[in-house]
Amino acid sequence: MQSLTACLLCAAFFGSLGSSFLYGYNLSVVNAPALYIKAFYNKTWIERYGEPISTETVTLLWSVTVSIFSIGGLFGALSATLIIKVLGRKGTLLLNNSFAVIAAVLLSLGEMSRSFEMLIIGRLIMGVDSGIALSALPMYLGEISPKHFRGMIGQFNSILICLGVFTGQVLGMPELLGQESTWIYLFSFLALPAMLQLCVLPFLPESPRYLLMERRDEAGAEKAFQRFLGKKDVSQELEEVHMEARAQDKLHTVSVLQLLKSPAVRWQLITVIITMACYQLCGLNAIWYYTNGILREAGFTESILPYITLSTGAIETLAAIISGLVIERIGRKPLLIFGFFSMAVFFSLLTVFLNFQDRVSWMPYLSYVCILAVIASFCSGPGGIPFILTGELFEQSYRPAAFMIAGTVNWLSNFAVGLLFPFIQETLQSFSFLVFVAVCILGSIYLYVVLPETKNKTFMDISQSFAKINKMPIPSPGQEMELVLSINSDTNGKAQDATKMQTSL
């Protein structure tokens, strides 16, 4: 088995650094400076209108500042397909850095300009950046990786999301940038990963599958494969892509409507929608509502809460790294099912512990252990594999539309959790986590019944594993041999034509 190359690792790391890292960072970066941002809103309001801002207005502005990130993410996911079609995978990632830089400028200069609108618009643009990134990056990582490393390379997306969350927590500490005089630099930091990606990614190849199947650039695809795989003879990889192209009815990129209508990918689409919905609705985002309250009940003082909270980010990152290291041995399906089922178990225990929290002095510590276990369970599989599956379950022509649908489900579910969980919490109190227990169990059952294992399989193999449930004919060995022979004859014909041209010249 061939080893990982420096080119492939650089593409995975720097591609993720300017993309999923920024998404994770923006999930946590607004928590530390929340009080200072609200004070800035009040100060700006007094300067404009000569009176303090009302409690309702500042709450509304703060809610818009936080939630508009998800709205921007939805816009980004909806626009990603068109940008990817025009610029390719790598080109889209490079263009996306401009959104991050613009957002960093707006967020950094908002206080100086006495404009809270700049902060809100900056968060919106940063959401657009994240929406595009979470579509283009997993597609790029899946297409540049050999099949036996596709899961590991794909998990860079999840690892860098977790690392971004952790970095936001660390930089937001009072000793660093979480102070009234320095909170704007938390947003200035957004430009650094984007600039690093801009410095490195242009020197790395585009997706060879994109070059060959959509740009018809066989020479460029061959060079890209050679650099990513670290070998000269890539004829087998090129032949695999040719076979995939010949097997598809349409070589051009299909639209979302065409994807929704196609019976050949019906259950792949249902699987991605359910998996991506469970990714957001499994309750991890809701955990943050309880963490600080449980820590206070456990007797931790307010001054050390930020340091204890760092443990959640550290556990998240560690679990994602371990998942990336074992995914090619264990597989996608077992990790997903284990992650969702473990979350259901620990959410159930957390519900029990929360109900006994006031009666037993040491019970809050068990609640906090459950929170860490929920986070670790999420990052062991559900935190990154849904994005990998979206790229693996669809062949080339369907993939951009599939990522658009997956991204839309992702951001709408994210927005729904933020909007509905406070009402669920108010109604059900400590029993609110039972809603997520149901989601996790139902998701595990569906994945166990429907999802095939995809590790070490080509994109054609994965599509064929869904053929029976989609009620589509599976190509016979004779038909597959005809495809191979037609590819070889086509390749030989092109070589003979090229030889004749050189002779005539």
Image: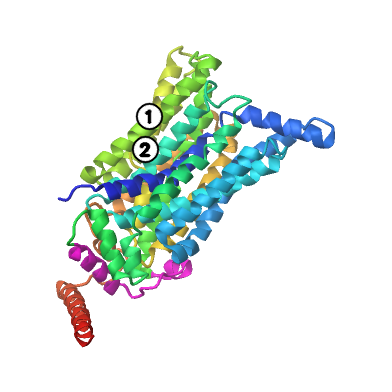
- Residue 367 appears in which quarter of the rendering? top left
Label 2 SS: helix
| In the depicted structure, whether residue 53 falls above or below residue 212 | above
Q: Is residue 238 magenta?
A: yes
Can you tell which mark lies on residue 283?
A: none
Question: Amino acid type of disc 1?
Answer: Ile
**Marks 1 and 2, the one that precedes in the sequence:** 1
Question: Amino acid type of disc 2?
Answer: Cys
Position of 300 with respect to 265 (left or right) is right
Identified at 30% across, 53% down, the residue is: 451
Label 1 close to label 2 by CB (< 8 Å): yes
Residue in the foreground of this view, choosing between 271 and 116: 116
Quadrant housing the C terminus: bottom left
Give the residue furthest to the right.
50
Identified at 30% across, 39% down, the residue is: 323
Report the residue marked by disc 1.
315
Position of 258 with respect to 468 (left or right) is right
Label 1 SS: helix
| In the depicted structure, whether residue 486 falls above or below residue 140 | below
Residue in the foreground of this view, choosing between 112 and 245: 112
The residues colored magenta run: 234-262
Give the residue furthest to the bottom.
504
Q: Is residue 204 magenta?
A: no
Give the residue furthest to the front.
505
Residue in the foreground of this view, choosing between 413 and 434: 413
Residue 234 seen by the camera: yes
Report the residue marked by disc 2.
379
Residue neighbourhood size for the residue with mark 1, other residues' Cα within 10 Å, grouped as few (<14), some (14–19), many (≥20): some
x, y percent for residue 456:
21, 53
